[in-house]
Image: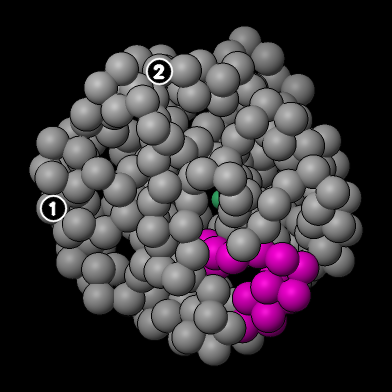
Amino acid sequence: LSNRKFHPKSSVIKVGNTTIGGDEFVIMSGPCAVENEEQVIETARSIQASGAQILRGGAYKPRTSPYSFQGLEEEGLKIMRKAGDETGLSIVCEVTSLEAIESASKYVDMLQIGARNMQNFYLLKEAGKTGLPILLKRGLSATIDEWLNASEYIMAEGNPNVVLCERGIRTFETATRNTLDISAVPVIKEKSHLPIIVDPSHATGIRKYVAPLSKSAVAAGADGLMIETHPNPAIALSDGPQSLTLPEFDRLCKELKPYIELT
Ligand code: PEP
Ligand code: MN
């Protein structure tokens, strides 16, 4: 279902009042984790003014350590919905369980399946059944073929609304958190009609590398970007070191604008 051979035309996926794929470039941004209403609303207003169309924010956080902040759950989803309604931005939140899918379906415009759950086939099927657009992140050690097979699990439920997200893979390199596989962009474009966006934040784990890799994603032909931002990364409850400040995000959008077409 994801194969371009049987579907030569590139897919355009509707997400809330925006679309992903086709000629337009989409920018998603927001905090790693929803922490409180002020943080999310301030971020939403700022990224919208900078040119973003979709607000991201985790209410269920699949943290590496069980002792790290795990997310506000339904309260976080409500905050995201409010920020979406106030700004007109579409919203995307990660789901990590069946209960999270059930709750999130009431609030979000798009469900995110995180890298750690890319091969959680039960979760993929249940997410597929909602009919909502799904942002499917590449697994930490997944081949492109395994990733596309994961998209099939969603699409086989009758849900064609899948967007792929390259977020870096685990290699022997330790200078960055993961290694951004920029070649995944043209490879996916050849093999599949599904849109692909790039997440340079999780790919590098380091703020100063986010802008150069965002530019590389545009150059490689990605359909969009997902960039973590925070009003004050120093006090972020998760992924502060890779989060851009709001002015840094604004500067990056201005640098990208001559090269992309935004809705
Ligand atoms: C995230 O987007 O906050 C996240 C946890 O990403 P990933 O699943 O790519 O690690
Ligand atoms: Mn994160």
What is the three-letter code of the residue carrying label 1? Lys
Name the residue nearer the viewer: 27 or 171.
27
Residue under the point 46% across and 38% down: 195
Q: Nearer the viewer, mark 1 or mark 2?
A: 2
The reply to whether the residue tagged 2 has its Cβ within 8 angstroms of ligand 1 is no
Left or right side of 233 for 129 = left
- Which residue type does callout 2 highlight? Lys
SS at badge 2: helix
Q: Earlier in the sequence, mark 1 or mark 2?
A: 1
* Residue 41, image x, y percentages: 61, 83
Q: Which residues are magenta?
A: 41-57
Image: 221 above or below 4: below
**Image point (60%, 17%), residue name:** 183
Image quadrant where one finds the C terminus: bottom right
- Reply yes or no: does residue 243 show up in magenta: no
* Quarter-of-image position of residue 249: bottom right
User: Pointer 1 and pointer 2: residues touching (CB < 8 Å)?
Assistant: no
Which residue is identified by label 1? 129
